[in-house]
Image (cartoon, grey):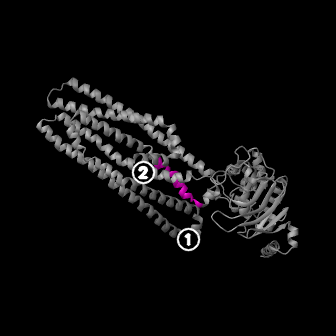
Amino acid sequence: MDNKFFQSLNYNFRHIKKFLLEYKYKYLLGILFLMTADILQLIMPKILGIITDKLSSNSIVQYDFVFYIKILLIVAIGIAFCRFSWRMCIFGNSRHLEYNLRQKLFEHLELLSSDFYNHKKTGDLMAHGTNDIRSVRMAFGIGVVMAFDSVFLTITTVTMMFFNIQWKLTLIALIPLPIIAIFIGIFGKRVQLKFKVVQECFSKLTDYVQESFSGITIIKSFSQEKNSVNKFKNVNDLNFDKNLDLVKLYGLMMPMITFVSSISFLIALYLGGNMVIKGDLSLGQFVSFITYLGLLTWPMMAIGGVVNMLQRGIASMKRLNLILDYLPDIDDSTADFNITNINGDIEFKNLNFKYPNTNKYVLKNINFKLKQGQTIAVIGKTGSGKTTLVNLLLRRYEHYEGSILIDNKPIKSIPLNILTKNIGYVPQNTFLFSTSIKDNICFSDGNYTDDEILQATKSAQILKDINSFDLKFDTILGEKGVNLSGGQKQRVSISRALIKKPQILILDDSLSAVDTKTEENILNHLEYELKNNSAILISHRISTIKNADCILVLDKGEIIQQGNHEALLKSDGLYKTIFDKQQLEDTIRKEI
């Protein structure tokens, strides 16, 4: 049973085993200071007993008082020093553990593929990085102290009581204490299960709050403040109720342990008092015994605390293990590390793709070539697979039929860092960080020169807008760039991609929020700057893609037309239908 328990601990805490081994000597030093403090504490009752006996026999003199006071003072200083030292060692270690585990979790999350985040909510991940890690830290901080303190102090105190005072009285007084072990067995597992539920409820609460704050403008625009507050109240109530269930369980466990230890105290008081009256025990020994028994109160309570802390730590570590055990779907296991650069020739051959856990193909029989220096455009109805196409080129997904080649090499053979370094990607949903405009533009490398920054912003037609701000490039953006317009955000994102000087530039409907004149200026600059580079333009507007070398028309995941603008207009098809519709819309807009 004990062996299974330790095997379970070893398995549950496997991801921090390396840390524990590295810091084991500091933990051992802390435990040594803790035990030394416990031993010093045992001197106090002994001296109190001696002083009591001397007082009761009127044999104490001033010299004795001074001598014993000096001893008590030295012991007190020793206890204070040891307590400070074990706190620095053990609590310091637990803080290092918290730091390392949080760093490890974040680094691991950064390595995971996009598909992982399609199934995990932000609030849940935030709960893992806060509450769960804090619970593990508590288990290896105060939990370690309680565990060793309760065991060592109990053994040493009982030993002192047994051999130095009265062994019969000690045995009788400690009879109720095994009941504590029974309580621990009953409550321990239930604490772990209930704490797991508490953490899951906290995840839901965090996720709802994060989502509500991110979508606060939508909530307000639809006047859903009251409804949102009511939903929050339901989630908050659930979190409160589950926490209260845990508090009730823990609240029941601790008083019962305290009650059992109090019974021991009452037994000792009654029997010890009678032994003093009969002369079988001196008054000083009785005082020492009661003081020792008082020292046992903390270890008895600490046993309950150990169970609580350890079970919480196990529950949280199990939740963290689910993430830390999750392996990236996409890695460099098939990479050829001799590849250090790419030119930009792209080819899709007989490609078919369906998303994980689905049976419907979203891309079917995709075939096209893009030579270095050329621009290919993709147009089609919403849901036709345009963004999915570039996601495969970015290696967001890998389980597809057919092949994707870059420079006539399978894309899986190109190291991920080489691929991402040479691709500049501007998604349709732009994301800007809550930092300065300059930091957002220089996100890929903080060492860009001022000239490079100016050139990128000129090409993206955003320099004039930036200079209109009081702080210019040092303007701090709100969350997701909330203090910029949609068009400004898109152009800052384009600057961020252009400054990399990528071999392949992908614009995924990232000019949708700019006016036609600005769009034309941007495209003219791109044509000049990317004359030796490859580009993929995705758009709903034909004005964006009409000058591309080749245009792919997607419908229901298939390429139904391809060719340049003039060739596609000569044949009846979806492209000409979209063109005629947009021409009519432009005419109506001008008349209005």
Q: Specify whether residue 56 is painted magenta.
A: no
**Is residue 118 depicted above or below 70 in this figure?**
below
- Residue 16 location, x and y as percent? 52, 44
Mark number displayed over residue 311? 2
- Residue 377 location, x and y as percent? 80, 63
Q: Which residues are magenta?
A: 119-136
Q: Secondary structure at mark 2?
A: helix
Mark number displayed over residue 291? none
Residue in the picture at 50% in, 69% down: 226
Type of amino acid under label 2: Gln
Type of amino acid under label 1: Ser
**Is residue 116 depicted above or below 105 in this figure?**
below
* Closest to the observer, 64 or 415: 415
* Residue occupying the far top of the picture: 63
Q: Nearer the viewer, mark 1 or mark 2?
A: 2
Badge 1 is on which residue? 223
**Label 1: how many residues lie within 10 Å, few (<14), some (14-19) or many (20+)?**
few
Within the image, what quadrant is residue 52 found in? top left
- Residue 490 visible at all: no
Within the image, what quadrant is residue 90 found in? top left
Instruction: Tell whether label 2 touches label 1 (CB within 8 Å).
Output: no
**Is residue 36 depicted above or below 211 in this figure?**
above
